[in-house]
Image (cartoon, rainbow, N blue to C red):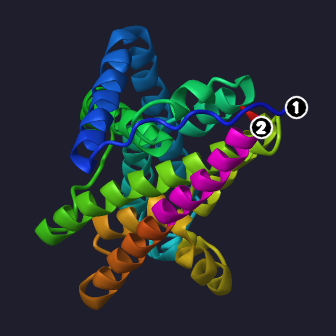
Amino acid sequence: MQITAPIPRPRSFGLAHKFGLMFEFLRSSYLIMLAHRVRYMVGVLNYMTYVAVNYYLWESLYAGIPKGEAPGGYTLGEMSTYVSVGWIMRSAYFSNADNILAARINKGEINSDLLRPVSLFLQFYGAALGEALFRAMFMALPVLILALFVFNIAPPANVVATVCFAYSVLLAFHIFFAINFLTGLIAAWTEKIQGFLWAKFMLLQFLSGLLFPLSYLPPKLEQLFAWLPFAGMSYTPLQIYLGRVTGDGLRNELVKQTLWTIALLWLCDVMWSRVKRRLETLGG
């Protein structure tokens, strides 16, 4: 790649102004999603299908299990609620930030982002927030309403579980976004990462506990995966929803999820600083 002069650094603005600009990216992302009504309708249908397939799959699996036995410690009602709420929750915070970021780096469009008076991280973070807001209102909520009419989904275990679940889902969004952002930055070192993105998509469903609870794994693997940040995207919120963690256990899970969120967001800032210096040296 040809060496060019460094990209001019944008004018520095105060923190309040930067977050105001981030809000504009949030608003823009929300309005763009709102304009694509067909995509919204297809999205509702897709996630309703995910919920239905997993719900009936586990119902069929439990039909062959003697009564009184609960594989992984989950009753059929708990397992049905687990997979249903898990996919509904994922419909709210899912985004393609990794794919979009990688494409902008590979095409050199990242140069225009560098000239804006707000960091790339805040640009993508604002856009992800806007998309999550839209998805929560127009995908997750309709799917939840439909699912409640069709399937036997239990409510949160209690009031404490409800509040903690809401906080845990907020952290799940940030963990998912941070992992996506970090993945997209890999494009600064390699031209094609589509295969890696697909592998990551499938692997996260397994490591996060979305496909099945991590308690189905051997004890040592369960303990390992439960301590990784991926569990914070599905397994931890769903454990809280079902009331399977309480007291000190609940506090510890939320602290662990919070610390992983902070660590990953910090890593995003560090990695972006390195990528930015690389792009400025190469001229995009």
Which quarter of the rendered picture does the C terminus lie within? top right
Instruction: Check residue 265 for magenta coloring.
Output: yes
Q: Secondary structure at mark 1?
A: loop
**Category of crowding for the residue at label 1, using alpha-carbon neighbours closer than 10 angstroms: few (below 14), some (14–19), many (at least 20):** few
Residue at 55 percent across and 24 percent down: it is 112
Instruction: Check residue 121 for magenta coloring.
Output: no
Q: Position of residue 249 (x, y in %)?
A: 33, 86
Query: Which label belongs to residue 282?
Result: 2
Label 1 amino acid? Met
Q: Secondary structure at mark 2?
A: helix
Label 2 amino acid? Leu
Whichever of labels 1 and 2 marks the residue nearer the N terminus, that label is: 1
Judge whether residue 140 can be spotted in this image: no
**Disc 1 marks which residue?**
1
Front position in the image: 18 or 192: 18
Q: Using the image, determine if residue 202 lies above or below residue 39.
A: below
Residue farthest toward the right in the current orientation of the protein: 1
Q: Position of residue 224 (x, y in %)?
A: 62, 80
Give left or right: position of 115 versus 247.
right
Q: Using the image, determine if residue 254 lies above or below residue 194.
A: below
Q: Using the image, determine if residue 208 lies above or below residue 183.
A: below
Q: Which residues make up the magenta segment?
A: 264-282
Proximity of marks 1 and 2: CB atoms separated by less than 8 Å: yes
Q: Marks 1 and 2, how far apart in space?
A: 7 Å
Residue at 77 percent across and 31 percent down: it is 4
